Image: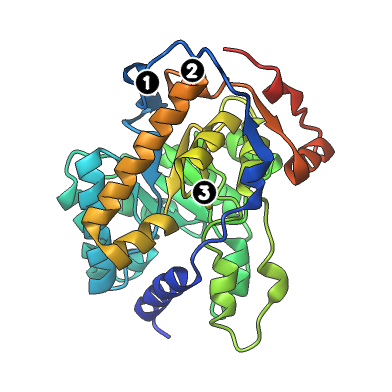
């Protein structure tokens, strides 16, 4: 199967499989505030994360590109929606265009349709510095996302089997490009040890990419003659991964993996994420209902976030990260076993 065919195979199977939404979100409960002392008009969703200005705590996470006209159309419509609402957008892996530059147009359309927006380039951890520079130049990117997808590659019939030297390559890119570098998991979560290693080489932002969203092991298993079922349930649930990652200070955390409503998004931020990336949920709406429906969904999410922040008395993303909450169930047990004191969440004030 060619790379172009594989790209569309991934999109098709992602839409067919849908998302499961991690039950770990249900382990997070907010403490009701009877006197929030603010109104909807007081809530501000914008923030600055390092060199990136984000008008919203949600962004369109990496999906596709490099698969010819079909992926060109998806990136075009995503960019139109991003431009209309002022959302940041990451493109899918640009390695296809690195290897075959005739595919560059499937990514370049994002900047064409969103000339003033925040765009995030994307490559895998096999990329070298020259690849990174080309990917950034291709879409005039404001940041570069490097994705980690070990489980997907191991499950993929034609995937990589050697991941040696990834941290060194990432370090070279961090030191060699002029935009912030985001390192992202693709759906299996990041442990605090991984985040600590990334911070030690200068990575500014880690995107946890936890289990609960699009399951790439399940997708790749459907492409195999003999499946590897043990990888289908692999990974760290998204809320757990955010809590683990945010226990490492001085690095910004993005959350992604299974966010489909405003409450889950607010929970992710309250656990420690600075912003929330959404991919599969947006992709399904775009493909099945079109761009207008996607914009409507994004607007609804932003309104839900605003309403919930008002109820909690949080006027900003910074304040939201300090509201008290209770962690129970499997999430509590996981974090306790990992030495993360959940009382830091339940007893905090702002």
Structural crowding at the residue carrying mark 3, measured as other residues with C-alpha within 10 Å and reported as few (<14), some (14–19) or many (≥20):
many
- Left or right of residue 220, residue 11 in this image: left
Of the two numbered discs 3 and 1 on the same chain, state the one appearing first in sequence: 1
Q: Residue at x 16, y 51 (%)?
A: 113
- Relative to 328, residue 19 above or below: below
Residue to which mark 3 is pinned: 184
Q: Residue at x 38, y 41 (%)?
A: 301
Q: Residue 43: which disc?
A: 1
- Left or right of residue 24, residue 300 in this image: left
Quarter that holds the C terminus: top right
- Relative to 289, residue 194 above or below: above
Q: Residue at x 57, y 55 (%)?
A: 21
Of the two numbered discs 1 and 2 on the same chain, state the one appearing first in sequence: 1
Residue to which mark 2 is pinned: 313
Q: Secondary structure at mark 3?
A: strand
Give me the C-alpha separation between circle 3 and circle 2.
31 Å
The colour scheme applied to this rendered structure is rainbow
Residue 147: where, in percent of width, then height?
A: 50, 54
In front of the other: 71 or 81: 81
Residue 267: where, in percent of width, then height?
A: 56, 35
- Relative to 76, residue 24 above or below: above
Q: Secondary structure at mark 2?
A: loop
Q: Residue 73: which disc?
A: none
Q: Residue at x 43, y 86 (%)?
A: 1
Closer to the observer: label 3 or label 1?
1
């Amino acid at each position: 199967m060619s790379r172009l065919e594989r790209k569309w195979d991934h999109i098709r199977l992602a839409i067919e499989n849908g998302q499961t939404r991690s039950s770990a979100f249900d382990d997070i409960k907010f403490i009701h505030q009877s006197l929030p002392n603010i109104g909807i008009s007081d809530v501000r969703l914008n923030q600055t994360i390092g060199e990136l200005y984000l008008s919203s705590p949600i962004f369109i996470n990496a999906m596709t590109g490099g698969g010819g006209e079909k992926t060109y159309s998806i990136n075009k419509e995503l960019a139109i929606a991003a431009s209309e609402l002022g959302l940041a957008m990451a493109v899918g892996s640009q390695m296809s265009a690195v290897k075959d530059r005739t595919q560059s147009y499937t990514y370049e359309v994002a900047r064409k349709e969103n000339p003033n927006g925040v765009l995030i380039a994307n490559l895998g951890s096999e990329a070298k510095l020259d690849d990174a520079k080309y990917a950034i130049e291709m879409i005039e990117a404001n940041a570069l996302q490097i994705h980690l997808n070990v489980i997907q590659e191991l499950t993929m019939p034609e995937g990589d089997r050697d991941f040696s030297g990834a941290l060194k390559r990432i370090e070279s890119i961090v030191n060699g490009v002029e935009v912030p570098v985001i390192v992202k998991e693709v759906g299996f979560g990041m442990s605090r040890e991984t985040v600590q290693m990334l911070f030690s080489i200068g990575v500014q932002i880690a995107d946890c990419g936890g289990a609960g969203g699009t399951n790439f092991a399940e997708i790749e298993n459907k492409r195999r003659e003999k499946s590897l079922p043990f990888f289908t349930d692999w990974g760290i649930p998204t809320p757990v991964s955010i809590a683990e990652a945010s226990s490492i200070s001085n690095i910004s955390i993005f959350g992604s993996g299974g966010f489909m409503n405003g409450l889950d998004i607010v929970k992710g931020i309250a656990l420690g994420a600075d912003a929330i990336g959404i991919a599969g949920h947006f992709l399904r709406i775009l493909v099945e209902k079109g761009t207008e429906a996607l914009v409507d969904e994004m607007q609804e999410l932003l309104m839900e976030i605003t309403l919930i922040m008002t109820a909690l008395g949080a006027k900003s993303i910074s304040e939201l990260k300090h509201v008290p909450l209770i962690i129970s169930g499997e999430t509590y047990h996981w974090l306790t076993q990992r030495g993360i004191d959940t009382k830091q969440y339940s007893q905090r004030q702002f």
